[in-house]
Image (cartoon, coloured by chain):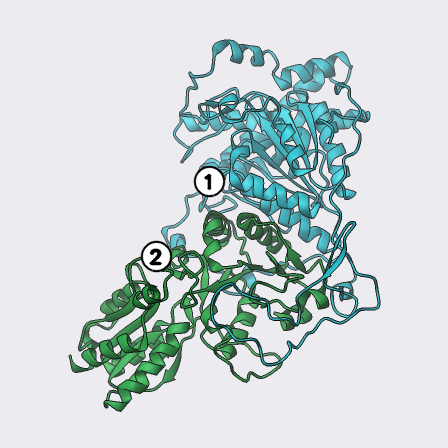
Chain colours: A green, B cyan
Amino acid sequence: MFEEMAADPRVVLIGEDVGVYGGAFKTSEGLLEKFGWERVIDTPISESAIIGAACGMSYLGLRPIAEMQFIDFILCCFNQLTNFVAKGHYLWNAPAPMVVRGPSGGGVHGGPFHSLSPEMYFLHTPGFKIVYPSTPYDAKGLLKASIRDNNPVLFFEHKFLYRRIKEEIPPGDYTVPLGKAIIRREGKHLTILSYAAMMHTSLEAAAALAKEGVEAEVIDLRTLMPLDEETILNSVRKTNKCLVVHEDTRTGGIAGEIAAILSEKAFHDLDGPLVRVTSLDTPVPYAPTLEEAFLPNAQKVFDAGKALAKF
Amino acid sequence: MPASETRVNTPRLSRQQHLDLYYYMRLNREVEDTMTRLFRQNKIVGGLYSSLGQEAISVGSSYALEKRDWLAPMIRNIGALLVKGVPPRDIFTQHMAKYTSPTKGKDGTSHFGDLENLHIISPISMLGDLIPVLTGVAMAGRYLGQKIVAMTWIGDGGSSTGVFHEGLNLAASQKAALVLILENNLWAYSTPVRRQVPLENLADRAKAYGIASYIVDGNDVVAVYTTAKEAVERARSGDGPILIEAKTFRRRGHAQHDPAEYVPPAQRAFWEKRDPITVYEKFLTEGKLLDAKGKKEIEDKLTALLEKEREFAENSPMPPPELASEGVYCTGPECHNLQPKWERPIDELLPPKSCVEPVWTVEGFGCGKGSSGVQAPIHFGDTESPSEKPAAAAKATAGPANPPKKLPTAKPAARGKARR
């Protein structure tokens, strides 16, 4: 954000506690000092107003970044997002080049209102691009690309990864394109599709599977909307089996969407059913023992992968 | 905080301004009458909404704006679109879902906009959502150095939505140059205003946001204009958002299908006598600003214009089916080459000119630092402290700390009814 704001005066940040406090997770630390009160705007607790104001700003040519303090609160401005922001370009030629970002996901004892995986609510609304990086390199590159995109981009930052994944990233300008998945690990026996925190879980499981002679190809989706069907199909045509791992709840999660796509476009290439490893169909529970049961983990992915490989 | 103000200054309008207001009100009504006829011929695709009896509000308020200002209409503000410069054919083609409409038939009624030239933002059907969006417009205008005002409308019904509150509160705390016109036409579909809000005057809500407000007779176009003009200039000069409650009455039903039998006949009769156009014609005639000949000239002009516009609309094609799947995303620069109009030096917004000390100043208690450089406790999780200091640590700058803008203080208001 710092680099984009330094390079482009059209970029402003608006949200709760983003200024003096630097953001609840320190993601905007130091921005206020450099760019001042006009560009780093602390708002009242009004998600609809934050999104609406960002939308209005984008109509005058600015490129606002609207922060949701926890992505769970994005549901408070659901109407503004889905009815105003997303539909503008299709209906009246008014794209809203804004980014809505915030910490999402669980595994941090956040409980049911601070652990949301929100992607499917918005995947179902035409007009958004949805980005969910899993590495620091991708986070920087994808955020830059999102800010420069002319469409409204929802940029989800998995909070479990905020301080756990560290990576040396190059300074300076680079972008990662939206709409492109990446192969994290090559393999030939089955394809594992994942994103965000579950990416690392999948890699852990893939390493364990390799010890048993199962070579999984692990693909990081990175952008959920538009989905990189080409990379997915190429991999499935090679391995003939597909396993999807996501932290989102089972029913209505993207695995179902992927299953339909594979059924439509790769039916003859499949040697086994589309397997899903997902969270339970419940709100995110608070107690660590319950949350562990709720979430996928490397063991669950390993078990599913082993069974699928045998199919 | 004083009670709502009524207009303090009574500027004189020029003859041309008087006639402009008359022309636009007549145009507003003729456009809507034309559409009523088209509706009865089944040529309007969806619903049709009427602003009969409320033309003075749409026309009077929007006439107070300058070309550089922005507006967003609600469903009964076609008059404002006409004043802003939208040709009647755009209104007709929108309602008839034609390919030649501003949205190529993708949306209907007043759901269209023009960002680059006329500075109009399209509404959505949900009420109140325009308020934060127009607040953002005002904030962005100020950011770019433009001295613009953003204007939009809301009804007595729409003023109950959560987003009304969020938007107006944000506008007030940001001192945004927003003029919000609350048209209290006494009915929200079938629900009278008394059932929805326990207030006699909805303008009193302004007190809750610490902003100025006015109450005006919505059927008196000159009063609406002069009040709106004063509000617009106050907002432009940095007074913050202004709420204007315009008292009026919804003469027709919620939409074309609604016979509105729930409205007491005596109430309707009372307001019919106060038709804004009839009342204004009397004023113009008595003031020797309009005679029978002048009136006929205007009417002939309107008839010719609307005949031409209606024919264009009726002869336009419907959009082709292929259009349905196009346009969800903006895929290249050709669909977004909107450049912001900077009217201030850009280097003010970049380091080092933009640098500030990140402190809050609380009157009487001094300053408190930001927590830059210190790991803020998050109330859960086993996250570790960063091993190194963040790259952009706070530096003491040469200039004084820049505290956020103070809350607006109320100006004393002169009491006295608005007179023409």
Q: Position of residue B68 (x, y in %)?
A: 71, 46
Q: Is residue B5 left or right of residue A88?
A: right
> Mark 2 highlights which residue?
A283
Q: Residue placed at 53% from the left, 67% from the top?
A: A146
Q: Quadrant of residue A209?
A: bottom left
Image height check: is B110 above or below B327?
above
Quadrant of the drawing holding the C terminus of chain A: bottom left
Quadrant of the drawing holding the N terminus of chain A: bottom right
Name the kind of residue labelled 2 in the image.
Pro
Q: Nearer the viewer, mark 1 or mark 2?
A: 2
Whole-number angstrom distance, CA of label 1 to CA of label 2? 39 Å
Q: Nearer the viewer, residue A68 or B388?
A: B388
Q: Position of residue B253 (x, y in %)?
A: 46, 22
Q: Which mark is residue B108?
A: 1
Q: Do marks 1 and 2 share a chain? A: no
Name the kind of residue labelled 1 in the image.
Gly
Residue B411 in sight from this viewpoint? yes
Q: Residue placed at 64% from the left, 28% from the top?
A: B203
Q: Position of residue B147 (x, y in %)?
A: 75, 48
Q: Residue placed at 54% from the left, 29% from the top?
A: B307
Q: Looking at the image, which residue sits at the far left?
A: A311
